[in-house]
Amino acid sequence: MRIHYIEDNIYFGMRNRLGMSSGGRSLKHRARYAIVTDILETCRAPALQTHVMYKANLSYEGLKNYLSLLLDSGLLRIEEDRDSTRTYLTTKKGLELLGHSHAIEELLGKRK
């Protein structure tokens, strides 16, 4: 039945997007949601760009795209020290998003 097939794909796709098991298959790509939460978690304390890149497991190009998105959305901000060292920090809005994310994970049984 076609509707059943579509529902299975939607369910399978949702499980993948939320970082849940894919039934034994390895997940090749993470969802934007997972990458964004990884970056916001990393930047709870001021973090250098390279630290964010390694913690979020992103390429430099990927990191630039995500940092731009999060800065433009007001979820991250840049702090610059006297020696011109740039660090990234999660904003209040970003912390609120993380709180909602953790609540969703808790409801889904991913977080204890």
Image (cartoon, rainbow, N blue to C red):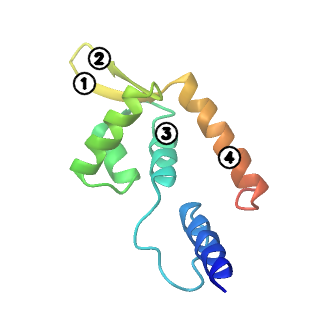
Secondary-structure class at tag 4: helix
Instruction: Give the residue type that dot 1 points to.
Output: Thr
For the point 47% across and 45% down, which residue is it?
Answer: 36
Classify residue 10 as left or right of residue 74.
right
Residue where numbered disc 1 is placed? 85
Mark sitting earlier along the chain (1/3): 3
Crowding at label 1, few (<14), some or many (≥20) Cα neighbours within 10 Å? few
The span from disc 2 to disc 4 (Cα, nearest Å) is 31 Å
Q: How many marks?
A: 4
The span from disc 4 to disc 3 (Cα, nearest Å) is 12 Å
Secondary-structure class at tag 3: helix
Instruction: Give the residue type that dot 3 points to.
Output: Leu
Residue where numbered disc 3 is placed? 40
Instruction: Give the residue type that dot 4 points to.
Output: His
* Quarter the N terminus occupies: bottom right
Mark sitting earlier along the chain (2/3): 3
Instruction: Give the residue type that dot 2 points to.
Output: Asp
- Picture layout, residue 84 above or below residue 76: above
The span from disc 1 to disc 4 (Cα, nearest Å) is 31 Å
The span from disc 2 to disc 1 (Cα, nearest Å) is 5 Å
Crowding at label 4, few (<14), some or many (≥20) Cα neighbours within 10 Å? some
